[in-house]
Image (tube, coloured by chain):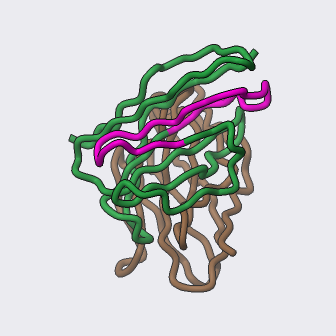
Amino acid sequence: AQSVTQPDIHITVSEGASLELRCNYSYGATPYLFWYVQSPGQGLQLLLKYFSGDTLVQGIKGFEAEFKRSQSSFNLRKPSVHWSDAAEYFCAVDGNKLVFGAGTILRVKS
Amino acid sequence: DTEVTQTPKHLVMGMTNKKSLKCEQHMGHRAMYWYKQKAKKPPELMFVYSYEKLSINESVPSRFSPECPNSSLLNLHLHALQPEDSALYLCASSQETVPGETQYFGPGTRLLVL
C-alpha cells in the first residue's frame, strides 16, 4: 500500500531564509509524487509534481523538489521564503489513488 | 481556466436535515472526486467518478450519497449526518482517473453538523 510521511508537523522560518520540507513515501513502483499547498480554510493548490525524468522538479511560486529514489524522499525547497508562503503543505503519492501525508504547517516570522 | 467551484462555502445542518453540496468544473475533465478533511488532518478520499459513473467508494456511510448528473457537475447529498461528520468537504477534478493525473481542487464546503 502507498503511504507518505511528513516528519515535521510545524516549521518556523524567518522571512528571506531558505526552506526545506521533508517528505518520505512508500510505494512499490515508480511513484507519482505531488506537493500541494493549502491556506487556512481554502482548497489545495498544486505546487509541483514528479512522475519521471529529471529528478529536480520546478514548480510555481519559486518552489522546487528533488526526487531521491534511494532515500524514498521528495523534499520541497525554496531559497528565500516570503511571508505569503505561510500555509500548510501536503506531500502526496498517487498509485491507484491520491494519498496525502499529514501535512507540515509553515510559519514565517518577520 | 483551472477552476473548480463549490457551493455553499459554509453549511450548518441538524442531524435530521437533508442538504446537498455542489461542485462544478468546466475544464472538460472526466474524473471528479469528493474528499473529506477533518481539522488538522489531510484530505481523505470518499468517492471517485469516472465518465459520470461511480468508480470508487471508500466505504463511506450511506448517509453520504454522491451524484454526477453530467460531466461538469458533482453533488454530494447529505442525510441524517452525525456531529463527527463536521469537516471541510473538497471536490476535485482531473482529465482522467489515470495515476499521475493532476487533480484540481475547489475551495471546499465547511460543514458543521449540530
Q: Position of residue B20 (x, y in %)?
A: 51, 26
Location of residue B31 with respect to B6 vertically, above or below: below
B70 or B103: which is nearer to us? B70
Quarter of the image with the C terminus of chain A in it: top right
Q: Position of residue A45 (x, y in %)?
A: 42, 43
In magenta segment, residue B75 = yes
Relative to B84, A83 lies left or right: left
Tell me if residue A22 can be seen. yes
Looking at the rendering, which quadrant does residue B78 occupy?
top right
Q: State the extent of the magenta-drawn residues as a range.
A: B66-90
Secondary structure of the magenta portion, mostly? strand
Location of residue B42 with respect to A23 vertically, above or below: above
Relative to B82, B62 lies left or right: left
Relative to A12, B33 lies left or right: left
Looking at the rendering, which quadrant does residue B65 occupy?
top right
B5 or B18: which is nearer to us? B18
Location of residue B23 with respect to A100 vertically, above or below: above
In magenta segment, residue A6 = no
Looking at the rendering, which quadrant does residue B14 occupy?
top right
Q: What residue is drawn where x is 60% and y is 52%?
A: B45
Q: What residue is drawn where x is 34% and y is 59%?
A: B51
Q: What residue is drawn where x is 65% and y is 47%?
A: A103
Q: Which chain is green?
A: B
Q: What residue is drawn where x is 51% and y is 31%?
A: A39
Quarter of the image with the N terminus of chain A in it: bottom right
Q: Position of residue B23 (x, y in %)?
A: 40, 35
Q: Position of residue A30 (x, y in %)?
A: 51, 83
Tell me if residue A110 can be seen. no
Q: Which chain is brown?
A: A
